[in-house]
């Protein structure tokens, strides 16, 4: 008999600002780092969302900071205890200096997860697979016959996941580089910074695709999930490069492909309505911008089990909209919405495998 596991990815805006250095929640009336939201209100909203997800494993993007004074694991496990979550154990990979870690909360009664990075920490053009994600990757970004050195500011979290009672899979949690032209003031500077950022984002996705291709070639069940800061048809600069970073990671014709139904929907309706996982306020225009940035991609072996995906969007998902308390919590908790994939582990259906 198969066991259905729920994996989630959730980018929590300014999660770090809700904790003191000891990892305790402030949970008070002071303003959070979210616009017009107190720390107590954001904390309560996050508890409501995490409880509603009731996931076995949650990729937390922009998790609390990890450094000499602060501990991501301590903060998240304290949050899980406060919220009464099944997913009460936490693991991180390579820490970064952005105050936005990538972490994984999981239910230790259902799964075990350990950081298991792959590859050498140094770049090697002749290698079949990409370097380790805390290392460097060399690629010609601007077609000038000179190799550029690429680094991840937030190295992806690579996990070996074991399912209680049998079964295993790989999981890669991702927070790719933002393409937003932060700091650019003139139209020329905005264009220059946007193009440079997209080059770096695409280079990260090429690096990630090389890792994905290695797992797929070995037939390893794989989930790749997180915030890609990109998607098919998302901005005009995509035309300069031919494909979005998400399309690169998924894989092209003739290659083993990952599958995400929301990415497929965006690819098939470039001029129509597409799913969205994030909402940002454009103050200078007085309106909200919606975007599809967060994905849960699975390998062919896992796609064959007929998983169920869901974007927990407060307006687009009927169940979220009908539940007023959950709807308000989703709006208060973050500028992103969770994405879940319910996976019947261990029962592939070969007849259902043609999903690429």
Image: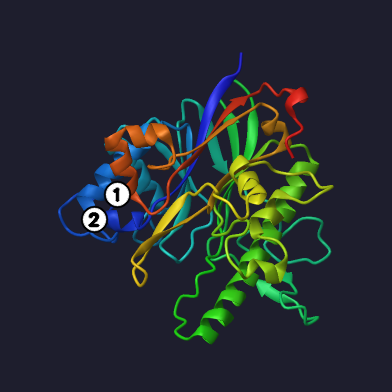
**Is residue 250 at all visible to an observer of this figure?**
yes
Q: Is residue 118 above or below residue 329?
A: below
Closest to the observer, 266 or 114: 266
Q: Is residue 345 above or below residue 33?
A: above
- Residue at the spot 74% in from the left edge and 55% down from the top edge: 210
Label 1 to label 2: alpha-carbon separation: 7 Å
- Label 2: state its secondary structure: loop
- Residue at the spot 76% in from the left edge and 49% down from the top edge: 213
In the rendered image, residue 47, in percent from the top left (x then y), is placed at 30, 39
Query: Which of the two discs, 1 and 2, labels the residue nearer the N terminus?
Result: 2
Closest to the observer, 2 or 182: 182
Query: Badge 1, how many Cα within 10 Å: few under 14, some, many 20+?
Result: many
On-image quarter of the N terminus: top right
- The residue identified by callout 1 is 332
In the rendered image, residue 128, in percent from the top left (x then y), is placed at 82, 56
- The residue identified by callout 2 is 37
Query: Badge 2, how many Cα within 10 Å: few under 14, some, many 20+?
Result: some
Closest to the observer, 157 or 334: 334
Q: Are marks 1 and 2 in contact (CB under 8 Å)?
A: yes
- Residue 316 lies in quadrant: top left
Instruction: Say left or right for 6 vs 123.
Output: left
Instruction: Say left or right for 320 vs 229.
Output: left
On-image quarter of the C terminus: top right
Residue reaching furthest to the front: 272
In the rendered image, residue 180, in percent from the top left (x then y), is placed at 50, 70
Closest to the observer, 88 or 50: 50
Instruction: Say left or right for 226 vs 16.
Output: right
Q: Is residue 177 above or below residue 222?
A: below
Instruction: Say left or right for 298 vs 324.
Output: right
């Amino acid at each position: 008999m198969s066991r259905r596991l729920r994996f989630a990815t959730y980018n929590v805006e300014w999660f770090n600002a809700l904790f003191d250095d000891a990892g305790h929640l402030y949970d008070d009336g002071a303003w959070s780092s979210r616009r017009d939201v107190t720390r107590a209100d954001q904390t309560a909203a996050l508890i409501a969302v995490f409880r509603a997800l009731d996931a076995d494993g949650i990729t937390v993007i922009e998790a609390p900071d990890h450094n000499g004074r602060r501990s991501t694991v301590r903060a998240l496990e304290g949050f899980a205890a406060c919220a009464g979550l099944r997913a009460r154990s936490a693991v991180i990979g390579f820490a970064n200096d952005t105050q936005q870690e990538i972490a994984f909360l999981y239910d230790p009664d259902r799964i075990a997860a350990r950081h298991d990075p792959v590859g050498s920490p140094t770049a090697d053009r002749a290698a079949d697979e990409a370097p380790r994600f805390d290392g460097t990757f060399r690629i010609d970004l601007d077609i000038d016959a000179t190799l550029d050195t690429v680094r991840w500011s937030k190295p992806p979290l690579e996990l070996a996941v074991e399912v209680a009672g049998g079964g295993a899979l790989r999981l890669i949690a991702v927070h790719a580089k933002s393409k937003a032209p932060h700091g650019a003031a003139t139209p020329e500077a905005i264009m220059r910074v946007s193009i440079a950022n997209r080059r770096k984002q695409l280079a990260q996705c090429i690096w990630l695709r090389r890792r994905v291709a290695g797992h797929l070639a070995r037939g390893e069940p794989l989930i790749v999930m997180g915030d890609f800061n990109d998607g098919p048809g998302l901005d005009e600069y995509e035309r300069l490069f031919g494909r979005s970073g998400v399309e690169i990671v998924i894989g092209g014709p003739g290659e083993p492909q990952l599958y995400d139904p929301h990415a497929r929907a965006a690819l098939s309706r470039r001029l129509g309505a597409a799913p969205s996982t994030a909402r940002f306020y454009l103050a200078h225009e007085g309106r909200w911008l919606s975007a599809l940035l967060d994905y849960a991609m699975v390998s062919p072996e896992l796609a064959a089990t007929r998983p169920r995906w869901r974007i927990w969007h407060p307006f687009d998902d009927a169940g979220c909209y009908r539940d007023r308390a959950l709807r308000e919590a989703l709006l208060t908790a973050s500028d992103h919405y969770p994405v879940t994939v319910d996976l019947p582990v261990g029962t592939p259906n070969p007849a259902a495998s043609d999903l690429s």
